[in-house]
Amino acid sequence: MVNRVRTRSHPLTLLARAISAATQPTLTTIPMLLLLNATGSPRITFWQWLVWSCVTVTFSTTLPSLAFFVMLRRGIISDIYISERSERPLAYGLMIALAVIGTEIARLIGAPHRTILFLASGALCLVIAATVNARVFKISIHTMSAAYSTVALVMVFGQSQLPVLLLVPLVWWARVWLRAHTVWEATAGAIVGAA
């Protein structure tokens, strides 16, 4: 059996890093929110889309990212991946709270129903991930987010979007190749996100 060398400069390692960087949860969530906000009704004005997009993107990506940056700078978390199990309740609790608040604000300002469902589903995914991460292992948020976004795309826009589902095994491979997650952690993320 050939031993695979996973050095920093190995071509597959570089590819896996590029895939992981391009499919960060923030980068898969923002386009979906922009698209869902734009296609929720035939009579959406630019200003409605802008307000809905600003609110939903702020609460689902911008505020959690800023909070993580502040926690990292203050030493509350040791790394952006929340590797230390003891740091996870606060970090996940904050993400869940922001997701729930953002979902409710989106509902109150009349965002499209599909956007609200997408946000609520994301909050539920975070609750499941936080529970699993606190008790079992570190579920892959990358694969969860990729599965969650691609399945939502197919559900909303139909079978023509099926090829985008190939993104999920690609992200799965990248996270496992980089040893960021085990096979089971990456698989669990994909299952939770798709479900």
Image (spheres, rainbow, N blue to C red):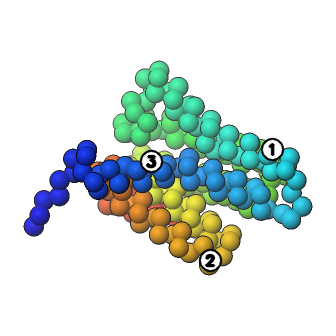
Pointer 1: what residue? 51
Vertical comparison of 195 with 119: above or below: below
Left or right, 92 with reference to 169: right
CA distance separating discs 2 and 1: 29 Å
Other-residue count near label 2 (Cα within 10 Å), few / some / many at <14 / 14–19 / ≥20: few
Q: Secondary structure at mark 3?
A: helix
Question: Which kind of residue does numbered mark 1 sit on?
Answer: Val
Q: Are marks 2 and 1 in contact (CB under 8 Å)?
A: no
Question: Which kind of residue does numbered mark 3 sit on?
Answer: Ala
Q: Quadrant of residue 42?
A: bottom right
Image x and y of residue 72, in percent: 46, 27
Vertical comparison of 62 with 184: above or below: above
Residue at coordinates 52% horizontally, 56% vertically from top-left? 145
On residue 21, the disc is 3
Image x and y of residue 162, in percent: 56, 75
Q: Which quadrant, please, contains the C terminus?
A: bottom right
Residue 93 versus residue 153: which sits nearer the camera? 153
